[in-house]
Amino acid sequence: MAIGIHFGKVAGSSATADALFGRSKWWGFPDMPEDLEYPEVPVRDEYVDEDGKDAVDEYDDPLTFICQIRCSDLAPLDPKGVLPHEGMLYFFGALDYFLGNLDAALSPGMGEWEAPYFKVLYSPTCDNLHTHSILYDDGSEACLPAVGLSFAPVGSMDDGFRLLGKPFFEEVQQDLPGMISLLQIDGNDDWDLRFFDCGMLNFLISPADLAARRWDAVRCYLHSA
């Protein structure tokens, strides 16, 4: 079983963006309860200062918010309850480099990513959410426009954007055997999202960990043909 992800209209106005509050969406900003913290990754930036001396900046950089999935939207397509049918799933990752920012401080490469470069969070409820906005220094929003989502059944090894099933690339299956692709992300020209030549990013979890709702056990793997 796998669930395909289909993209709707881009939120081109604040009214449209507000309409996606608390709903399944791609990009934009996450709507999270107070007890969930926006994930960040520590960055160590080494450089030569104006005096020609070696210098280091250390700071925490927020991960790119990828999507939030309202679990009730998946219930009609998930009769066995493989995924939760209540609450919200949130996916974050170091995607700036793959969205065209080639100078991004965080640019994990091929293969399995280290834990700081991605995060999956879960809220058991969709009540009392607030939008966690991140702004650039000039006050503009540090995100791509939000897009509404819909879902439909697809093949368990299809390419494209989907939940569940197996990773599209057999090499990923061989390196991490038996893992379920919790979320598969393909390239998309509309967003200039490219994982090298023809790559895909998979958030992976074992069947046992998924059954136990152990979101901290998720792994992340990038492969390109």
Image (cartoon, rainbow, N blue to C red):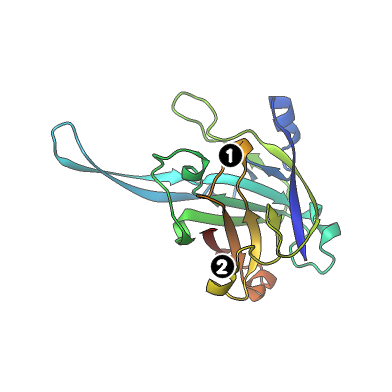
The numbered dot on residue 132 is 1
Judging from the image, what secondary structure is the residue with disc 1 in? loop
77 on left or right of 170: right
Badge 2 density bin: few <14, some 14–19, many ≥20, Cα 10 Å: many
Left/right placement of residue 34 relative to residue 115 reads right
Disc 2 to disc 1, how far (Cα)? 33 Å
**Visible in this render: residue 7?**
yes
Picture coordinates of residue 74 (x, y %)? 79, 56
Q: Is residue 61 left or right of residue 143?
A: left
Circle 2 or circle 1, nearest the eye: 2
How packed is label 1: few (under 14 Cα within 10 Å), some, or many (20 or more)? some
**Residue 70's disc number:** none
Q: Percent from the top left, x then y, of residue 167? A: 63, 64
Q: Is residue 21 above or below residue 153?
A: above
Would you name the residue on which mark 2 appears?
172
Quarter assignment of residue 85: bottom right
Q: Quadrant of residue 141?
A: top right
The answer to whether residue 36 of the structure is visible from this angle is: no
Q: Earlier in the sequence, mark 2 or mark 1?
A: 1
Residue at the spot 70% in from the left edge and 64% down from the top edge:
157
Q: Amino acid at mark 1?
A: His
